[in-house]
Image (cartoon, rainbow, N blue to C red):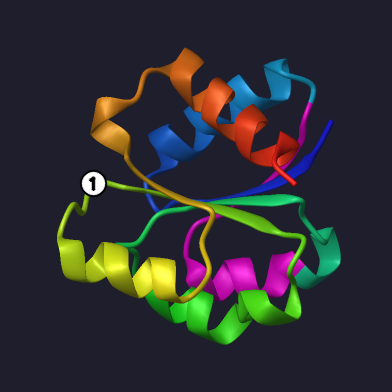
Amino acid sequence: MAKILIVEDELPLRMAYDTILKREGHTVERARDGEEALQKVEELQPDLILLDLLMPNIDGITFLQKYDLKKHPKVKVIVFSNLSHSDQIEKAEALGITRYVVKSTVTPSQLSQLVNEAIDEE
């Protein structure tokens, strides 16, 4: 199974995603914002990052700019946000994300499926 970093500022969502992904057998670490994620990502060396965009301190786009996926080509990133503005999607895609998903449209079982599909992609 995979090592996953959940970056989400809302505690109930962070805990729900944690529970869902641990049930699938994944190792999960959580961060409440991009700043904490930047600290944890080097230690965890995740296979996948589940990333919200609207967060305090360092938002998702800034996290992607600082983390620089070109330096971490094996890491998959699913942006899981309620922002559906095309400019935000384009910015995230230009920074190398794997997928952009509007979280309000996804059920818990679909989240598991999205994560597993992203991990299995070559």
> Does 45 sit left or right of 106 as displayed?
right
Rendered view: 12 above or below 77: above
Tally the marks.
1
> At 71% across and 24% down in the image, what residue appears?
22
**Residue extending furthest toward the left:** 85
Rendered view: 62 above or below 12: below
Q: Where residue 67 appears, x then y in whole percent?
A: 62, 79
> Does 33 sit left or right of 120 as displayed?
left
Nearest the eye: 121 or 84: 121
Can the viewer see residue 60? no
Q: Where residue 40 appears, x then y in whole percent?
A: 72, 66
> Does 32 sit left or right of 37 as displayed?
left
> Does 90 sit left or right of 28 as displayed?
left
In which quadrant of the rendered view does residue 112 lie? top right
Residue numbers of the magenta segment:
26-41
Nearest the eye: 80 or 20: 80
Magenta stretch contains residue 86: no
| Image quarter of the N terminus | top right
Describe the element under mark 1 as helix, strand or loop.
loop
> At 53% across and 30% down in the image, what residue appears?
114
> At 25% across and 68% down in the image, what residue appears?
88
> At 82% across and 59% down in the image, what residue appears?
44
**Residue extending furthest toward the front:** 122
Q: Which residue is mark 1?
A: 82
Can the viewer see residue 36? yes
Q: Where residue 4 appears, x then y in whole percent?
A: 70, 45
